[in-house]
Amino acid sequence: MLDDFGKNNPVSVPLPGRTVKFVQIAANNIIFSSANITIHYNDAELNGVNERDLTIYHWNGASWDGLPTIIDSANKTLGATIMSNQTFGLQERTMLTLLEQMPG
């Protein structure tokens, strides 16, 4: 199940940058250790955000975590591997996200 919240954040903690949209993904009666997700966006939702700078953020229940994100600008999709159902935000990548995703 996918709920598209648009720019309306369904949690009380804001993302730290320019947000494209929020979605919530749920899989009822399914147990998984990881899953690949694909989230579609359109040019109107970008509102000036560069597609190359998009990142999927995962709400972990306490804060937003940037996920390694695959950008397919030709098909207007973002992909990531998730470990749980939850709320996700599409946002312009910030310097903090880049630092969090660096190994080591």
Image: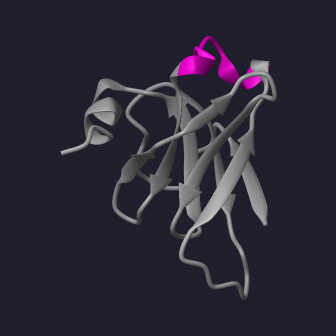
Q: Is residue 98 magenta?
A: no
Residue located 72% across and 75% down the image = 27
Q: Is residue 66 left or right of residue 34?
A: left
- Tell me: residue 45, above or below residue 35: above
Q: Is residue 1 left or right of residue 67?
A: right
- Tell me: residue 102, above or below residue 4: above
Give residue 25's quadrant in the image.
bottom right
Residue located farthest toward the bottom when viewing the structure as drawn: 29
Give residue 26's quadrant in the image.
bottom right
Residue located 28% across and 41% down the image = 100
Out of 28 and 31, give the one closest to the viewer. Answer: 31
Q: Is residue 82 left or right of residue 3?
A: left
Q: How far across and down, in percent of the image, does residue 81 sit?
A: 56, 56
> Which quadrant is the N terminus positioned in?
bottom right
Out of 89 and 104, give the one closest to the viewer. Answer: 104
Give residue 15's quadrant in the image.
top left
Q: How far across and down, in percent of the image, does residue 102 sit?
A: 27, 37
Residues rendered magenta in the picture: 44-52
Q: How far across and down, in percent of the image, does residue 104 sit?
A: 18, 45
- Tell me: residue 19, above or below residue 2: above
Q: Is residue 48 magenta?
A: yes
- Tell me: residue 101, above or below residue 63: above
Residue located farthest toward the left when viewing the structure as drawn: 104
Residue located 39% across and 50% down the image = 64
